Image (spheres, grey):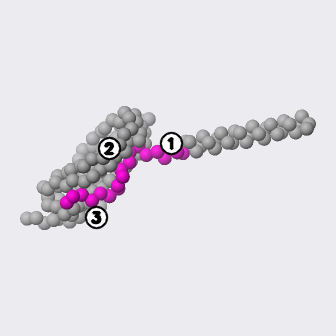
């Protein structure tokens, strides 16, 4: 084998190794980019009871997985009508939570149905906007669907 052929073969081998390293790095980056900060097992949750009166309390299961340590989660929650309109008066102010480590929690949540809800189908919408490293990392939401009865 001549010196010229040997140099070309080494150049091709080095280029192949460089491409392999870039491909592995791209795969690792995309898998980290797709990692969810917070996950809920269910997107739509049916509470107990499903049909309620204004002023009653509903209970529903929530399974949360926190997968992003060293982050801040801004939680917003509010009631929305069946047609998608979410009256401002039925929105709670945002609350921030700090996550230092990853963990999982399964619990029963409860909410009091506001007196202002008119009869019909409503959703309690709950969202987490997680911030990490100076930007929005992830948004995860769930909705609890209830039917408000005319109980007068």
Mark toward the start of the polypeptide (1 vs 3): 1
Looking at the rendering, in which quadrant would you find the N terminus? top right
Q: Is residue 71 visible?
A: no
Please state which of residues 78 and 25 is positioned toward the viewer in this rendering. Answer: 25
Which of disc 1 and disc 2 is earlier in sequence? 1
Please give left or right for residue 21 compared with residue 151 in the image: right
Viewer-side label of 2, 1: 2
Crowdedness near tag 3: few (<14), some (14–19) or many (≥20) residues, C-alpha within 10 Å? few
Q: Which residue is mark 1?
A: 32
Q: Tell me if residue 29 can be seen.
A: yes
Query: Where does label 3 land, which residue?
Result: 83
Q: Residue 48 appears in which quarter of the rendering?
A: bottom left
| SS at mark 3 in the image | loop
Q: Which residues are magenta?
A: 30-49
**SS for tag 1?**
helix
- Cα distance between the residues tagged 2 and 1: 23 Å
Is residue 86 positioned above or below 131 on the image? below
The residue drawn where x is 21% and y is 53% is 59
Distance CA(mark 1)–CA(mark 3): 37 Å
Q: Which residue is mark 2?
A: 105
- Is residue 135 shown left or right of residue 115? right
Q: Position of residue 129 (x, y in %)?
A: 36, 44
């Amino acid at each position: 084998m001549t010196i010229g052929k040997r140099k070309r073969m080494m150049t091709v081998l080095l280029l192949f190794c460089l491409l392999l390293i870039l491909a592995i790095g791209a795969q690792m980056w995309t898998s980290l980019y797709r990692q969810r900060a917070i996950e809920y097992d269910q997107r739509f949750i049916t509470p107990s009871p499903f049909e309620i009166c204004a002023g009653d309390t509903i209970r529903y299961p929530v399974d949360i997985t926190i997968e992003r340590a060293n982050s801040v989660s801004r939680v917003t929650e509010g009631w929305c009508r069946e047609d998608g309109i979410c009256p401002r008066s039925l929105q709670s102010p945002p609350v921030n939570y700090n996550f230092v480590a990853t963990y999982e929690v399964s619990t029963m949540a409860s909410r009091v149905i506001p007196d202002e809800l008119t009869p019909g189908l409503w959703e309690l919408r709950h969202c987490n906007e997680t911030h990490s490293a100076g930007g929005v990392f992830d948004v995860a939401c769930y909705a609890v669907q209830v039917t408000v009865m005319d109980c007068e």
